[in-house]
Image (spheres, rainbow, N blue to C red):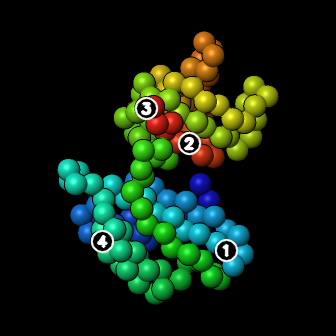
Amino acid sequence: MSAKHTLIEELIRPVVEGLGFQFWGMEYISQGKHSVLRIFIETDKEKGIDVEDCAQVSRQVSSILDVEDPITGEYNLEVSSPGLDRPLFELSQYESYVGSVVALKLRVPFDGRRKFKGQLTGVEGDEVVILVDQEEYLLPIELIEKANIVPQF
């Protein structure tokens, strides 16, 4: 995780949690004038996350980011629920979804490939265990660039 990513998360996590939501994770995509800071929030409430929850978090986070100014230049702030194809950021999240199908993209090739799609079978230490075509892979969490649950209908 980059220093900028860590700094932004340290600023917004307490805000999100102070509003009574779980900070699920965030993505910062730097693309010049089209940069995006995407924050995912979760709740224990049965109703889930609604538009007003996202708007409330957006207003509060926006205020903090305006004061602290950790992002230079223009960017769009998006706040949403993780959804059915939820991204996974932390080992504890992977542990919660053992048995689910996941799609992973790595920062660098592992066994000659960067993309994996298969059943998440566990977490061992700081490695994610995924079963792809009857072959098990242990992928270090720090190599994972992006991971999502693949909804099964």
- Residue 153 bears which disc, if any? 3
The structure residue drawn at horizontal position 65% and vertical position 31%, both measured from the top left corner, is 116
Point out the tag, 3 or 4, that comes first from the N-terminus. Answer: 4
Q: Residue 79 at what x, y percent from top left?
A: 43, 66
The structure residue drawn at horizontal position 33% and vertical position 55%, both measured from the top left corner, is 42
In the rendered image, which residue does mark 2 sit on? Answer: 147
> Closer to the observer: label 2 or label 1?
1
> Closer to the observer: label 3 or label 4?
3
Residue 142 in view here: no
Residue type at tag 3: Phe
Q: Quadrant of residue 113?
A: top right
> Closer to the observer: label 2 or label 3?
3
Dot 1 crowding, Cα within 10 Å, few <14, some 14–19, many 20+: few
C-alpha span from label 3 to label 4: 28 Å
Residue type at tag 1: His
**SS of the residue under disc 1:** helix
Residue type at tag 2: Ala
For the C terminus, give its image quadrant. top left
Residue type at tag 4: Glu
The structure residue drawn at horizontal position 72% and vertical position 75%, both measured from the top left corner, is 32
Q: Quadrant of residue 29?
A: bottom right
Direction front: furthest residue: 153
Tell me whether the residue at label 1 lies in contact with that at label 3, contact meaning CB atoms closer than 8 angstroms. no
For the N terminus, give its image quadrant. bottom right
Dot 3 crowding, Cα within 10 Å, few <14, some 14–19, many 20+: few
C-alpha span from label 2 to label 1: 23 Å
Q: Residue 94 at what x, y percent from top left?
A: 44, 36
